[in-house]
Image (tube, rainbow, N blue to C red):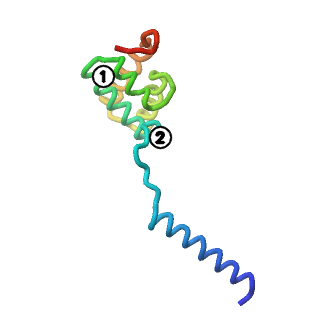
Amino acid sequence: MSRWLRFILATALGIAAGLFYGWVISPIEYVDTTPDTLRADYKTDYVLMTAEIYHARQDLNQAARDLALLGSDPPADIAERALTFARQIGYAEGDIYLLEELHRDLQTWQPLPGGNTP
């Protein structure tokens, strides 16, 4: 066997063994991650669930606190991104309505001074 063929075979075997170990024997398991690490579709579902709760309870401060788990952006921006994504992938009209309601109300929402919300 030539030197190059042995090198290529050894490299291919090493890559295959590494992939097998990483994907089958010891794959990464994410535990206790925060909602801000979710994909866009799951974030949109989270915002939709927040919108459903807001629609039922009309507690805008709680809705803003719930959305704060998705990042440091203002809650209205988070709701706007979710609404845009929901429209793009074709959420049901009822869901779009709930997201629009939450987004509209968050645009005029102001947190209490000092960062405390009731």
Q: Residues within 10 Å of mark 1 (few under 14, many from 20)?
A: many
Residue 44 sits in quarter? top left
Seen at 49% across and 22% down, the residue is: 74
Q: Position of residue 19 (x, y in %)?
A: 53, 67
Q: Is residue 50 above or below residue 17?
A: above
Contact, mark 2 vs mark 1 (Cβ under 8 Å): no
For the residue marked with disc 1, what is the amino acid?
Tyr
Q: Identify which residue, 35 or 54, lies in the foreground.
A: 35
82 horizontally vs 50: left or right: right
Identify the residue at horizontal 45%, vertical 32% (top origin).
70
| Element carrying mark 1 | helix
* Residue at the extreme left of the image, as rendered: 56
103 lies left or right of 10? left
x%, y% of residue 101?
A: 35, 20
- Compared to residue 62, the image places residue 37 above or below, namely below
Q: Residue furthest bottom?
A: 1
Query: Tag 2's secondary structure?
Result: helix
At horizontal 34% and vertical 14% (from top left) the residue drawn is 118
Q: Residue 112: horizontal and vertical position, in percent?
A: 42, 10
Q: CA distance from mark 2 to mark 1?
A: 23 Å
The residue lying toward the viewer, choosing from 36 and 95, is: 36
Label 2 belongs to which residue? 37
Q: x, y percentage for residue 59?
A: 31, 17
Asked which quadrant contains residue 65, the reply is top left
The foreground one among 60 and 40 is: 60
Q: Give the residue displayed 47% in from the left and 30% down from the top.
A: 81
Q: Amino acid at mark 2?
A: Thr
Q: Residue furthest right?
A: 3
Characterize the local packing of mark 2: few (<14), some (14-19) or many (20 or more) Cα atoms within 10 angstroms: few
- Which residue has dot 1 on it? 54
